Image (cartoon, helix red, strand yellow):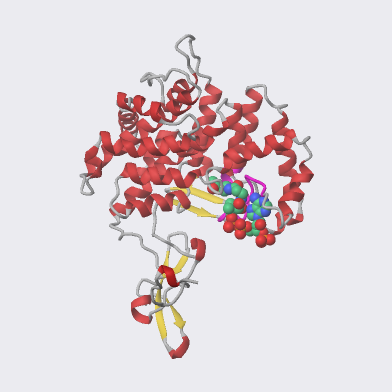
């Protein structure tokens, strides 16, 4: 007989809640019938204890510092795989055969061009528009070029085409966002280059010069994108699933996810990390002063790039990125950069400080990714765009899974704490 949990409520009421156990032995009790049976709902601000879905995509154990995509350890994927192979794995649930990967990559390469009207839309954005705002707007605008994507009853083949288009066009849009922000001509994609090399070409080449793709940079970018590719039910992914649960299109759902990722407590932290390191440098480089500020409860300052909602151990992605950061900086001759020195000092100080030890605050993925992006020549405002590019396969996989599971529209309950019923008072009679 299936295990149950007994919930005893005031007034002698009680209910047996079925226990559900995942493949990695995570346990939950199912409250699906709780309100109908008892009138109670659960209250869980920030969803810290709520499993919103059953998912077969990513497993993470924050206590042990484990992250696996479809069962494969992140360490192995970062070392041996490519970003598009990982994208295929996340979206379709298995590692592709050679032919499947060739077809998938070939399709993506074929769809990297975006409609010429997208170029015109760039002209309408105010010059101060943040790249994440442009990325989210233009991702949503793809619905205008592919209106069939709005049909919630698209066939599997049609959905696959939408997926390929999104993966292909987002890299072009992301690179153009940067080029447009600095007033450079926009580069068309090159089909002879692989995904990462083509992205770097679109970002950094000029029509006036021959662009040499640096293999160290391509490899670092590949690794970074793999490490960001999925992270189960984080804020932006939950947003994508929630928006998608209303039968919104993939483009619209991902566009909403981009906005969630932009927040400084989520993906926006990578930009904030570099800004923080630069602020420390401008201030004279005394890291202890900033550690003290982070510990001061009367000071809103937080050490950006430290702490994580689920990792109460070293973020496994941060471990890999840290090594990659050392390699990239060395290969580019930037190992003596003052920002790197500040980052290392901050990391050491925080790892040995009781405040951070007690709260299990370790450096997270954003702490090092910003350092690599900076070394690669990617401007700070584009860091979160890079994160979005990496997270895209995860968002797509989660949206697809949500639809395939035929999940109902997401609609949390609340506990109302406002005024109880009262009569309308005419404007002249109000105190
Ligand atoms: N610096 C200083 N203190 C911190 C930090 C930090 N970066 N992070 C958490 N704390 C402290 C809190 O003040 C709190 O202390 P208290 O218990 O004495 O009140 C305790 O640690 C727990 O913090 P919470 O905010 O309750 O933890 P939560 O799980 O809600 O937040 C979060 C996690 C948002 C990531 C938080 O650690 C943070 O703000 N970090 C900085 C921003 C950042 O790097 N975000 C990127 C996360 S990774 C990602 O999204 C890809």
**In the rendered image of this protein, does residue 254 appear above or below residue 327?**
below
Could you say where residue 217 lies in the image, as x and y percent from the top left? 54, 25
Q: Residue at x 32, y 55 (%)?
A: 245
Could you say where residue 228 lies in the image, as x and y percent from the top left? 49, 41
**Where are the magenta residues, as a range?**
302-319
Q: Is residue 318 left or right of residue 154?
A: right
Rendered-image quadrant of the N terminus: bottom left
Q: Give the number of marks.
A: 0
Could you say where residue 407 lies in the image, as x and y percent from the top left? 31, 59
Q: Main secondary structure of the magenta part?
A: loop
Q: Is residue 318 magenta?
A: yes
Query: Which one is in front, 92 or 151?
Result: 151
Ligand 1 occupies quarter: bottom right
**In the rendered image of this protein, does residue 34 appear above or below residue 214?**
below
Q: Residue at x 45, y 31 (%)?
A: 126
- Residue 411 appears in which quarter of the rendering? bottom left
Q: Is residue 238 left or right of residue 293?
A: left
Query: Which one is in front, 74 or 414?
Result: 414
Could you say where residue 42 lies in the image, as x and y percent from the top left? 45, 72
Q: Is residue 96 left or right of residue 294?
A: left
Q: Residue at x 38, y 21 (%)?
A: 189
Q: Is residue 148 magenta?
A: no
Query: Which one is in front, 132 or 270?
Result: 132
Residue 303 in sight: yes
- Residue 298 appears in which quarter of the rendering? bottom right
- Residue 389 appears in which quarter of the rendering? top left
**In the rendered image of this protein, does residue 106 appear above or below residue 160?**
above
Residue 92 in sight: no
**Residue that lies at the very extreme toward the front in this rendered image:** 428
């Amino acid at each position: 007989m299936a295990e149950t949990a007994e919930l005893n409520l005031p007034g002698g009421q009680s209910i047996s809640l079925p226990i559900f156990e995942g493949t990695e032995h995570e346990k939950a009790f199912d409250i699906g019938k709780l309100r109908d049976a008892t009138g109670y709902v659960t209250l869980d601000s920030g969803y810290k204890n709520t499993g919103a879905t059953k998912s077969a995509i990513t497993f993470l154990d924050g206590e042990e510092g484990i992250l696996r995509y479809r069962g494969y350890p992140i360490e192995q994927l970062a070392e041996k795989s490519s970003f598009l192979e990982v994208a295929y794995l996340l979206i379709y649930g298995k590692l592709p055969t050679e032919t499947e990967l060739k077809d998938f990559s070939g399709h993506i390469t074929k769809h990297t061009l975006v409609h010429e009207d997208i170029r015109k839309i760039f002209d309408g954005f105010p010059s101060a528009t943040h790249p994440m705002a442009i990325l989210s707007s233009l991702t949503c605008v793809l619905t205008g070029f592919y209106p069939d994507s709005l049909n919630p009853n698209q066939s599997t083949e049609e959905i696959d085409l939408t997926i390929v288009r999104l993966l292909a066009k987002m890299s072009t849009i992301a690179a153009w966002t940067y080029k447009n922000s600095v007033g450079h001509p926009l580069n068309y994609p090159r089909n002879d280059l692989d995904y990462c090399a083509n992205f770097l070409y679109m970002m950094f080449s000029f029509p006036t010069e021959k662009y040499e793709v640096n293999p160290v940079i391509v490899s670092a970018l590949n690794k970074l994108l793999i490490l960001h590719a999925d992270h189960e039910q984080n804020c932006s992914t939950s947003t994508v699933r929630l928006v998608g649960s209303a039968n919104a299109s993939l483009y619209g759902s991902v566009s909403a996810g981009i906005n969630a990722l932009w927040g400084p407590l989520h993906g926006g932290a990578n930009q904030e990390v570099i800004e923080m390191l630069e602020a420390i440098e401008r201030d004279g480089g005394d890291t202890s002063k900033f550690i003290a500020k982070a510990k001061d409860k009367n000071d809103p300052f937080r050490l950006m790039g430290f702490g994580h909602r689920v990792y109460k151990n070293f973020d496994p992605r941060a471990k890999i990125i840290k090594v990659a950061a050392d390699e990239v900086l060395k290969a580019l001759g930037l190992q003596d950069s003052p920002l790197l020195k500040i980052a290392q000092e901050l990391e050491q100080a925080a790892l040995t400080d009781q405040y951070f030890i007690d709260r299990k605050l370790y450096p997270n993925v954003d702490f090092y990714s910003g350092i690599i992006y900076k070394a690669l020549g990617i401007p700070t405002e584009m860091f979160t765009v890079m994160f979005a590019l990496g997270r895209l396969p995860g968002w797509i996989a989660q949206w697809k899974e949500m639809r395939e599971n035929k999940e109902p529209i997401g609609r949390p309950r609340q506990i109302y704490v406002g005024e109880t019923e009262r009569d309308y008072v005419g404007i002249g009679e109000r105190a």
